Image (cartoon, grey):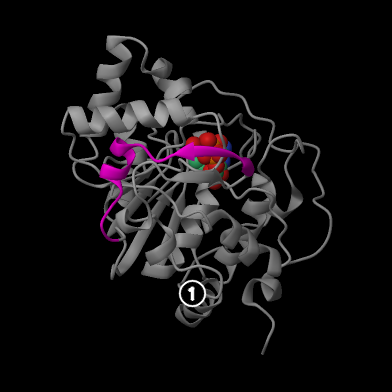
């Protein structure tokens, strides 16, 4: 059977929108959920034809020397020099080497998490992946505290930590990194030009303050490979969101993947307003073609995979 698995799962058709501004497919929720282990294995095998999370999750020290030139993945004309600090923080081996977990949580940042009471359930998973250094302490009841793997787009430094320009922003950032407690900090440093100054400041801070984090920097092929996987499943995503990247990586080492905080819509199923992020006032235009992502399309796919037992998507309160 040469057809790839997710193409069998997809429904065709345009995204019809209801009067309340909700895509209609969201209105049919699936009662009860059980993992479909054979489907999980098939997806893992399919994904492995494009990428292997063990290898692609990070470049390693032996891939580069200080002074080497890297072409940005999404802007090949521009380049970055591998600094001594960056090189010193490249892992010797992949942080996911030989890792296997029974259950994993991938936590997105949607405001749908507020008042969910999902914190305890999220923290109970064997491996918890979080995105973009989202704050935890003030929201612990809804989002939990535990992190084993945290992503950090360079833009977060500007957006949430004032570009680390003053001492108080820097201290706040250091405190946030201390919470990672020797877990993985995943920095997509080679995607596009623009954030290199921030990445270098972060790297220097980690070295100078001897912060206990295990840094990782995605391979130069990761994003194309993830895109390729979804594309051959007829899902054309210009630039996969961090959340989708994390799910795709997790298929390699998690037997059961539970997603929380994925809700790229301005309202919930009852028509109540949902914040884009649970922790700030950022606005987002979900259906715009101008932005890099197509989160509603990603969500539709994830929802389909949920209904088949390939993953579990939680978008309401936890029990
Ligand atoms: N997400 C979601 N619905 C939201 C907000 C986020 O489904 N309302 C998911 C997306 O998969 C997103 C992830 O949660 O990638 C992390 O959210 P965020 O930090 O906002 O990611 P962005 O910075 O917006 O996007 P990216 O890092 O993917 O560029």
Q: Is mark 1 within 8 Å of ligand 1?
A: no
Please give left or right for residue 158 compared with residue 118 in the image. right
Span highlighted in magenta in the image: 75-93
Q: Position of residue 166 (x, y in %)?
A: 33, 9
| Picture residue at 29% right of the left edge, 36% below the top | 85
The 10 Å Cα crowd at callout 1, few under 14, some 14 to 19, many 20 or more, is many
Q: Nearer the viewer, residue 94 or 10?
A: 94
Quadrant for the N terminus in the image: bottom right
Determine the image quadrant of residue 146. Answer: top left
| 242 up-or-down from 276: above or below | below
| Picture residue at 43% right of the left edge, 37% below the top | 132
Q: Nearer the viewer, residue 278 or 156?
A: 156
Please give left or right for residue 101 compared with residue 187 in the image. left
Q: Position of residue 312 (x, y in %)?
A: 48, 61
Q: Which residue is mark 1?
A: 44
| Magenta segment includes 211 | no
Dot 1: what SS?
helix
Q: Position of residue 15 (x, y in %)?
A: 80, 51
């Amino acid at each position: 059977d040469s057809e790839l698995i997710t193409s069998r799962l997809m429904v065709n058709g345009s995204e019809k929108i209801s009067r309340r501004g909700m895509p209609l497919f969201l209105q049919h929720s699936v009662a009860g959920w059980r993992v479909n282990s054979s489907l999980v294995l098939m997806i893992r095998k399919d994904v492995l034809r494009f990428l292997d999370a063990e290898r692609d999750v990070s470049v390693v020290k032996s891939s580069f020397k200080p002074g080497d030139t890297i072409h940005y993945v999404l802007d090949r004309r521009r380049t970055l020099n591998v600094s001594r600090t960056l090189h010193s923080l490249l892992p010797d081996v992949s942080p996911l080497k030989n890792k296997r977990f029974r259950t994993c949580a991938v936590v997105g940042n949607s405001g749908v998490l507020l008042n969910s009471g999902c914190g305890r359930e999220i923290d109970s998973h064997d491996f918890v992946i979080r995105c973009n250094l989202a704050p935890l302490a003030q929201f612990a009841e809804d989002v939990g505290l535990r992190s084993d793997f945290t992503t950090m787009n360079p833009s977060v430094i500007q957006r949430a930590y004032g570009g680390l320009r003053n001492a108080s922003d820097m201290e706040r950032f250091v405190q946030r990194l201390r919470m990672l407690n020797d877990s993985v900090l995943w920095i997509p440093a080679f995607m596009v030009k623009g954030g290199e100054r921030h990445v270098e400041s972060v790297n220097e801070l980690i070295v100078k303050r001897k912060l206990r984090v295990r840094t990782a920097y995605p391979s130069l092929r990761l994003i194309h490979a993830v895109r390729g996987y979804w594309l051959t499943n007829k899902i054309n995503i210009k630039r996969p969101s961090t959340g989708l990247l994390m799910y795709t990586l997790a298929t390699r080492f998690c037997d059961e993947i539970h997603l929380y905080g994925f809700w790229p819509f301005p309202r919930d199923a009852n028509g109540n307003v949902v914040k884009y992020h649970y922790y700030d006032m950022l606005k987002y235009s979900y259906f715009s073609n101008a932005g890099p992502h197509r989160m509603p399309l990603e969500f539709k796919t994830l929802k389909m995979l949920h209904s088949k037992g390939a993953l579990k998507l939680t978008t309401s309160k936890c029990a």
